[in-house]
Structure formats: structure tokens, C-alpha cells
């Protein structure tokens, strides 16, 4: 935990030394990282929810050949 605090403090110190326009870029990047995980979770959840809807379309004799690919 101490190492994480030191890393955080070191990063904070580096950010403080940046010009304002670069701080804005860092902020944008941090927001991107935060939301990227949320979007991945949302995509996985939506995919899982759609499986039942597509079950009939996926499991039919006409498309059985695709199961062998």
C-alpha cells in the first residue's frame, strides 16, 4: 500500500509540473481509461443478454455447417 501511495504521489508531482494544456490531456486520458472498463463490461453484458434472442437463429439445421468451422 505504501508503494502505491508513493507512486501516486510521484505521478501527482509530475502532473503538477506540466503546463495546463498537458494537464488537460492527462485528464482526458484518465477519463478514457476509467470509461473503457465500463464500456467493456457493458458490451459483454449486452452480448450475454442477446444470446437467448439469437439462439433460434444460431441453432438451426441450415446453419449447422457453420458449427463445424
Image: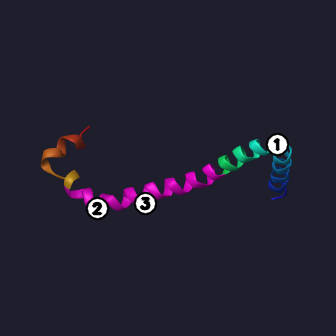
Crowd band around label 1 with a 10 angstrom C-alpha radius: few (<14), some (14–19), many (20+): few
Quadrant placement of the N terminus: bottom right
The x and y percentages for residue 66 are 22, 41
Of marks 3 and 2, which one's residue comes earlier in the chain?
3
Mark 1 or mark 2, whichever is nearer to me: 1
Helix, strand or loop status at disc 1: loop
Closer to the camera in the image, 60 or 18: 18
Helix, strand or loop status at disc 3: helix
Mark 1 or mark 3, whichever is nearer to me: 1
User: Marks 1 and 3, how far apart in space?
Assistant: 39 Å
Crowd band around label 2 with a 10 angstrom C-alpha radius: few (<14), some (14–19), many (20+): few
**For the point 23% across and 40% down, which residue is it?**
68
User: Marks 1 and 2, how far apart in space?
Assistant: 51 Å
Do labels 3 and 2 touch, CB within 8 Å?
A: no
Crowd band around label 3 with a 10 angstrom C-alpha radius: few (<14), some (14–19), many (20+): few
Quadrant placement of the C terminus: top left
The x and y percentages for residue 36 are 56, 51
Disc 3 marks which residue? 45
* Residue 57 part of the magenta-drawn span: no
Disc 1 marks which residue? 18
Which secondary structure class fits the magenta region best? helix
Disc 2 marks which residue? 52
**Which residues make up the magenta segment?**
31-56
* Residue 51 part of the magenta-drawn span: yes
- In the image, taking residue 41 as reference, residue 58 lies left or right, namely left
Do labels 1 and 3 touch, CB within 8 Å?
A: no
Amino acid at each position: 500500500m505504501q508503494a502505491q501511495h508513493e507512486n501516486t504521489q510521484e505521478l501527482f508531482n509530475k502532473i503538477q509540473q506540466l503546463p495546463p494544456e498537458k494537464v488537460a490531456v492527462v485528464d482526458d486520458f484518465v477519463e478514457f481509461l476509467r470509461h473503457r472498463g465500463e464500456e467493456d463490461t457493458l458490451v459483454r453484458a449486452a452480448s450475454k443478454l442477446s444470446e437467448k434472442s439469437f439462439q433460434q437463429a444460431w441453432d438451426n439445421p441450415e446453419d449447422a455447417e457453420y458449427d463445424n468451422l
